[in-house]
């Protein structure tokens, strides 16, 4: 696990000073790997890395050099992540090709697989990863990012070459070397305000993009980047007939989850793995199964001292039931306001999900005890856990109406006063699935966004992001199509960004057993009636785990890490929010009077505008840090390095 940085120079001459530039830029991602830091270079390529060591602590250094016996230094790899099936992969490569290995770590398995299998090697990897392999004989870099986008990978190309990095901040530091201007991407800003995150492959800097999840790439010195999608998730369910087939499905789910958690617990004996624990089924399942491999497991929970916004009591009951030590971190409004600029600095691009703040605090607490944690991200997308997935069922009567009637209902909804019960049902019922569902986030509609965004552009909207994924899922049932869209929007744009960024900010590795290739194969086969019922979500998963997790959690809907910003923005956070808006130098982009009016409307209590306000506040803080350079968070040096 590390923060990687790699620069492929446009010419040999450019490489002369590139190593110093890369070494300086590494400082921006030192939190991703406090155990080791170094650079490596040859005539065309410069690598930098910060390593967080969890497997083969003393030997699997980065960058890693490997080659077959006839050319032992042919490949050099920079790698961020963990490969959970590396032992099996090493064994199969040895048996089939006679592969030789020099370490006990997982990195060599990637390089050897690439040597013997070519680009298809990435399909054999079970884990989370972003890597780049330099082939010194072919003068070519091959790289890839994991199927779901658990680990990030930014890139920037200019006259000086092309660079890849785990952190966008490092690429901003290299902008002069690369010859790339630091310009704001206004289209990405509009997408952010609608979706609450910047969708892949965009970033808020026009000169910096992202390698997409499930994608590999090649590039040569002075050449163009070429990408290839290798992961094409398909939800191909078949009806379950009878109790025997249903029981067989539940058994497959339980077995694959047991296997995935077991593999996600791998580490050297000196490295302790813990678990995040909320009050829901997902984190409870991972913690309960993890306890089988670590009897001294520690579970971590965040909460707030406000009724209705904390799962601490349920999590404590769960921790006692499964027999694990329980650590709780309570977060105050003052702490959130004070720490948010630092968290935004770590994020690279704004993410308007308030739950990332308590996650940052509990990650900081967890790092005092462990070096890696398991968490339940991905279960909702794979097993049908969001209540919004019930919407096609509730809107089914509208689907039977002629198109003209649905259009009239949509027009009628516009004449109904805002906040009237049934208005949004009519509005959404008049729309097709492709027109109404853009992921598990709903923020500004176009008519609302025009009022605050001066650079609002007609024709720029969520369909820019969702259309390709709806096209790929034509003919599927509507819930599967929604899950598919969420894999490419909400999951990789919000859930996994916050999970990676705020844990790695604290030099803590987050592992997500639900987002495993083998788990997905089973989850993708679940029929609609086993995902959702009138009473519950994730029905098949709940049945599969019925004998594994405590009964008080089994049918409880989780809160996750809920944050009381709705009430705080009317009280404790109101003056703070006004100050951020007033101080911001975003007049060219935002109508600050309209933003203040939105805040006052929320304070009056007639409408809940908290998520819209939060998205604007987070962007203004981001702008103050990365564009105005007015806000300068005090970034601490990473703690808890180990001696290798």
Image (cartoon, rainbow, N blue to C red):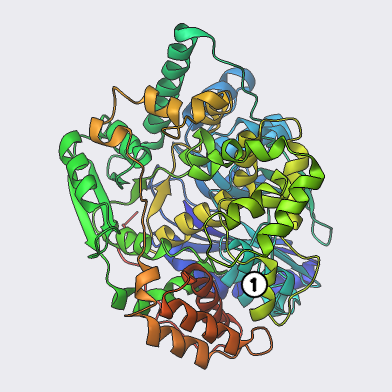
Residue 391 location, quadrant? top right
Residue 163 picture location, percent across and down: 69, 64
Residue at image point 41% right, 25% down: 259
Q: Residue 417 vs residue 117: left or right?
A: left
Residue at image point 37% right, 56% down: 508
Q: Is residue 481 among what the camera can see?
A: yes
Query: Vertical placement of 244 versus 477: above or below?
Result: above
Residue at image point 51% right, 36% down: 384
Q: Nearer the viewer, residue 340 or 133?
A: 340
Q: Nearer the viewer, residue 205 or 243?
A: 243
Disc 1: which residue: 448
From the image, which quarter does the C terminus lie in?
bottom left
Q: Secondary structure at mark 1?
A: helix
The crowding category of the residue bearing disc 1, from other C-alpha atoms within 10 Å (few below 14, some 14 to 19, many at least 20), is few
Residue 143 picture location, percent across and down: 68, 47
Q: Is residue 218 among what the camera can see?
A: no
Residue 362 picture location, percent across and down: 30, 59
Residue, far right: 223
Query: Vertical placement of 610 versus 407: above or below?
Result: below
Residue 118 picture location, percent across and down: 72, 34
Residue at image point 64% right, 22% down: 97
Query: Vertical placement of 473 versus 309: above or below?
Result: above
């Amino acid at each position: 696990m590390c923060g990687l940085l790699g620069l492929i120079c446009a010419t040999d001459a450019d490489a002369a000073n590139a190593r110093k530039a890369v070494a300086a830029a590494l400082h921006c991602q030192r939190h991703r790997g406090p155990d080791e830091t170094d650079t490596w270079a040859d005539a065309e390529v410069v690598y930098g890395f910060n390593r967080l060591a969890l497997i083969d602590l003393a030997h699997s250094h980065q960058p890693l050099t490997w080659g077959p016996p006839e050319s032992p230094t042919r490949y050099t790899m920079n790698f961020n992540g963990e490969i959970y099936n590396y032992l099996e992969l090493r064994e199969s490569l040895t048996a089939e090709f006679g592969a030789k290995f020099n370490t006990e770590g997982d990195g060599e398995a990637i390089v050897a697989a690439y040597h013997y299998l070519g680009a298809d090697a990435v399909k054999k990897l079970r884990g989370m990863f972003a890597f780049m392999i330099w082939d010194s004989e072919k003068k070519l870099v091959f790289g890839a990012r994991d199927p779901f986008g658990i680990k990030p990978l930014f890139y920037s190309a200019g006259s000086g070459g092309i660079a890849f990095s785990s952190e966008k901040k490092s690429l901003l530091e290299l902008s002069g070397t690369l010859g790339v201007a630091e310009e704001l991407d206004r289209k990405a800003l509009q997408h952010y305000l609608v979706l609450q995150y910047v969708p892949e492959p965009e970033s808020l800097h026009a000169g910096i993009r992202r390698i997409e999840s499930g994608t590999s790439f090649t590039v040569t010195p002075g050449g163009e980047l070429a990408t290839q999608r290798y992961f094409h998730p398909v939800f191909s369910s078949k009806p379950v007939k009878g109790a025997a087939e249903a029981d067989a499905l539940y058994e497959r789910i339980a077995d694959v989850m047991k296997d995935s958690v077991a593999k996600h617990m791998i580490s050297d004996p000196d490295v302790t793995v813990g678990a995040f624990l909320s009050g829901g089924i997902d984190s409870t399942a991972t913690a309960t199964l993890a306890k089988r491999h670590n009897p001294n497991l520690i579970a971590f929970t965040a909460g707030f001292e406000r009724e209705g916004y904390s799962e601490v009591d349920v999590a404590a009951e769960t921790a006692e039931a499964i027999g694990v030590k329980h650590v709780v971190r309570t977060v105050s409004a003052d702490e959130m306001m004070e720490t948010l600029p630092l968290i935004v600095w770590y994020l690279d691009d704004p993410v308007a999900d308030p739950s990332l703040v308590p996650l940052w605090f509990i990650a900081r607490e967890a790092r005092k005890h462990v070096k890696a944690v398991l968490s339940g991200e991905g279960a909702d997308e794979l097993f049908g856990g969001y209540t919004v997935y019930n919407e096609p069922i509730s809107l089914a009567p509208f689907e039977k109406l002629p198109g003209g009637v649905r259009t009239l209902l949509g027009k009628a909804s516009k004449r109904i006063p805002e906040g009237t019960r049934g208005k949004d049902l009519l509005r959404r019922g008049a729309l097709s699935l492709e027109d109404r569902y853009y992921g598990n986030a709903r923020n500004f509609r176009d008519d609302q966004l025009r009022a605050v965004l001066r650079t609002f552009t007609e024709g720029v909207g969520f369909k820019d992001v969702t259309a390709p994924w709806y096209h790929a899922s034509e003919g599927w049932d509507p819930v599967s199509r929604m899950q598919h869209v969420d894999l490419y929007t909400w999951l990789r744009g919000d859930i996994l960004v916050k999970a990676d960024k705020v844990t790695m900010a604290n030099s803590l590795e987050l592992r997500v057993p639900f987002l495993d290739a083998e788990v997905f194969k089973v989850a993708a086969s679940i029929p609609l009636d086993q995902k959702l019922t009138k009473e519950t979500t994730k029905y098949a998963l709940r049945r599969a785990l019925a004998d594994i997790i405590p009964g008080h959690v089994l049918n409880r809907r989780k809160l996750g890490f809920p944050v009381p910003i709705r009430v705080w923005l009317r009280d404790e956070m109101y003056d703070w929010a006004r100050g951020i808006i007033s101080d911001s130098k975003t007049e060219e982009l935002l109508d600050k009077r309209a933003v203040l009016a939105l805040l006052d409307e929320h304070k009056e209590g007639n409408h809940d505008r908290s998520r819209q306000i939060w998205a604007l506040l987070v962007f203004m803080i981001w702008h103050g840090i990365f564009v105005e350079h007015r806000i300068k968070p005090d970034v601490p040096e990473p703690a808890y390095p180990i001696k290798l």
